[in-house]
Image (tube, rainbow, N blue to C red):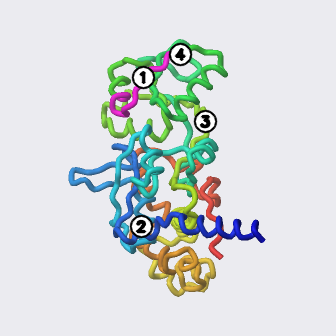
Amino acid sequence: MALIGLALAATTALAQTAPDTLGAIRARGQLVCGVSINAVGFALPDARGNFTGLDVDTCRAVAAAVLGDANKVRFVPTTSQVRFTALQSGEVDMLARNTTWTMGREVQLGLAFASVNFYDGQGFMVKQSLGVKSAKELDGATVCVQPGTTTELNLADYFRANRMRMTPVVIEQPEEIRQAFRSGRCDAYTNDASSLASFRAAEGREGEQYVLLPEIISKEPLGAVVRKGDWRWFDVVRWSHFAMVTAEELGITSKNIDSFMNSPNPDVQRLLGRSGEFGRAMGVDNEWAVRIIRQVGNFGESWERNITPMGVPRGINALWTQGGLQYAPPIR
């Protein structure tokens, strides 16, 4: 009996100390989302400070589900070095900033990856004038890389595995890395291929001198991250992404959603809250997905708005029905 009593007391204590991120967001009336710094296509503020991008849409979808308004988000630009501390400390409610899902980050940092909005891989960029066509030709090169990232570890692994030498030029701030590459301080610049494409797009005509080499040397599933322990909040973040993917699969967009309201398709009825109590079971209302689709759009709309202008094809980020990896479990 004593053991049972201790177990009950421990369970009660855990229940009392469990975080309530949803409650905190509703109380302040705003979602706080950690994003990248000036990442074209993913998180970029305009002259008025309004953010756009694929990661920005991830945050906005969650705000629409929880607060009813996709604009009720405060975006906090975070560096690679401080992003996890910002999340762990509660400075931000979630991260959506080109962060790779790894085992170490989940089991050692107390974080949980709720979704993948971009399946990426690490690549290399060089100047055309270098005359290099393959990463296998970079033996002896200097390579610009950001410290404290999976990118730095993958770089060392790749050169070691291919018995090549290289000298890393380790620079913390993204803009300083790019300037070092521009000035010729390093022969190559390595990062996620999406980030390299974003950098090249931001350079305008100057970007035409940069070449993305064909090798992809790692798996980099990028997505939304939350703190472990608040699993209701995890569910909301995860299923907000799945709602956008499901809407694209069903052909529901921000422009035609009204025509689907009386659809006899059971999958449509459940997504739009016309049947079932799935939203309420998750801690929001049953119109949560309708607001996401109306205010942010489906996943394909977000991609076309943010990533397509960079010249990046859907590729493995296409829906599973089109040979890609974007796949949402059923809402039922």
Q: Which residue is mark 2?
A: 24
Residue 128 image label: 1
* Percent coordinates x, y for residue 39 in the rendering: 37, 44
Query: Seen from this angle, which residue lies furthest left?
Result: 48
Residue 166 image label: 4
Mark earlier in primary sequence (2, 3) = 2
Q: Is residue 254 visible?
A: no
Mark earlier in primary sequence (1, 4) = 1
* Position of 88 relative to 257 (above/below): above
Mark 1 Cα shell of 10 Å, populated few (<14), some (14-19), many (≥20)? few
Residue 174 lies in the magenta stretch:
yes
Marks 3, 1: nearer the viewer: 3
Mark 4 Cα shell of 10 Å, populated few (<14), some (14-19), many (≥20)? some
Task: Name the kind of residue labelled 3 in the image.
Answer: Ser
Secondary structure beneath label 3: loop
Q: Which residue is mark 3?
A: 218
Residue 33 lies in the magenta stretch:
no
Q: CA distance from mark 3 to mark 1?
A: 23 Å
Residue 209 sits in quarter: top left
Callout 2 touching callout 3 (CB < 8 Å): no
Query: Seen from this angle, which residue lies furthest front?
Result: 2
Which residue: 48% across, 29% down? 190
Numbered range of the magenta stretch:
166-178
Task: Name the kind of residue labelled 1 in the image.
Answer: Gln
Position of 194 compared to 5: left or right?
left
